[in-house]
Amino acid sequence: MARRVCAGGLLALFLLGCAAGPQNPWHIPKGREGRFREARKVCHDLTDKDGRIVDRERFDACMYRRGWRRERWTDRIGFSS
């Protein structure tokens, strides 16, 4: 019984640690790093004011429109879609 509780607790901690959040890194498939840098620069320029990103939501929306998404926990364990 104690092992089940311990295993359940470890699983819960793992899932919480890997949960998707708004500040997760971008999912960049291998070989597409250049395209990502280009999209990031364009979106940064579109949402830039005085050298900084003014609105993170607008920046993320710009990136999503260009086909990029934030990393999911499944990407980290090798299951990407």
Image: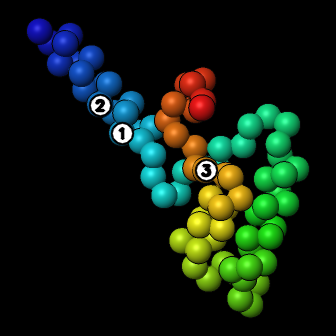
Callout 1 secondary element: helix
Q: Which residue is mark 1?
A: 16
Residue 70, percent from left and from top: 58, 50
Q: Is residue 8 left or right of residue 54?
A: left
> Quadrant location of residue 7?
top left
> Quadrant location of residue 28?
top right
Marks 3/1: CA distance? Answer: 20 Å
Residue 14, percent from left and from top: 39, 30
Near-viewer residue (74 or 68): 68
Q: Classify 10 Å Cα crowding around label 1: few (below 14), some (14-19), many (20 and above).
A: few
- Seen in the picture, residue 40 relative to 19 is either above or below; the reply is below
Q: Are marks 2 and 1 in contact (CB under 8 Å)?
A: yes
Near-viewer residue (67 or 4): 67
Question: Residue at point 80% right, 70% down?
Answer: 42
Residue 29, percent from left and from top: 74, 37
Q: Which residue is mark 2?
A: 12
Q: Which residue is mark 3?
A: 69
Q: Classify 10 Å Cα crowding around label 3: few (below 14), some (14-19), many (20 and above).
A: some
Who comes first in sequence, dot 2 or dot 3?
Answer: 2
